[in-house]
Image (cartoon, rainbow, N blue to C red):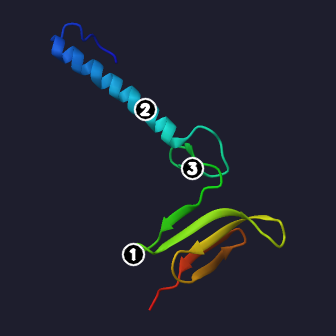
Amino acid sequence: MSGDVSKLPKWAQNKIQKLQWDIESLEEKLKQARGNQKTNVYLHDYVSGDYSYLPENRAIKFKIGKGDMDVIEVMLDLDNWTGMKCVEVRAVQGALIAIPSSSNVMKMGVAERE
């Protein structure tokens, strides 16, 4: 911290020191939560440029509607027929709808249930 706190009352100095320790502790926990070991599953913050690595081969779920079951799950997989690594996409409930957008983009949705 910048600035001379030695002229402050002792209770204020102690409080500032505790807050500094809290900040250091929380920064360390944030670093651990983000993950620092590179894996094949990660989040990329396009604003800050930061990467947050998740455990290897972890499934990711996206809630796309209001209901608890309006979820699309995405995970890495190995196709049994071709042996090719691929991304498996599944709807937790309902039928998936694939909407081609361009040669390298596909949007996914879930058909509304009746």
Q: Is residue 6 above or below residue 32?
A: above
Tell me the quarter of the image containing the C terminus.
Answer: bottom left
**SS of the residue at dot 3?**
strand
Residue at 53 percent across and 49 percent down: it is 45
Residue at 45 percent across and 38 percent down: it is 30
User: Mark 3: which amino acid?
Assistant: His
Q: Picture coordinates of residue 53 (x, y %)?
A: 58, 45
Q: Is residue 29 above or below residue 1?
A: below
Q: Mark 1 points at which residue?
A: 67
Q: Picture coordinates of residue 79 (x, y %)?
A: 77, 69
Q: How far apart are marks 2 and 1 (CA)?
A: 34 Å
Q: Which of marks 1 and 3 is in front?
A: 1
Q: In this view, does 98 lie above or below 8?
A: below
6 sits to left or right of 85: left
User: Mark 1: which amino acid?
Assistant: Gly
Q: Which of marks 3 and 2 is in front?
A: 2
Disc 3 and disc 2 in contact, CB within 8 angstroms: no
Dot 3 crowding, Cα within 10 Å, few <14, some 14–19, many 20+:
few
The image's mark for residue 10 is none
Q: Mark 2 points at which residue?
A: 27
Q: Name the residue under label 3.
A: 44
Dot 1 crowding, Cα within 10 Å, few <14, some 14–19, many 20+:
few
Residue at 16 percent across and 16 percent down: it is 11
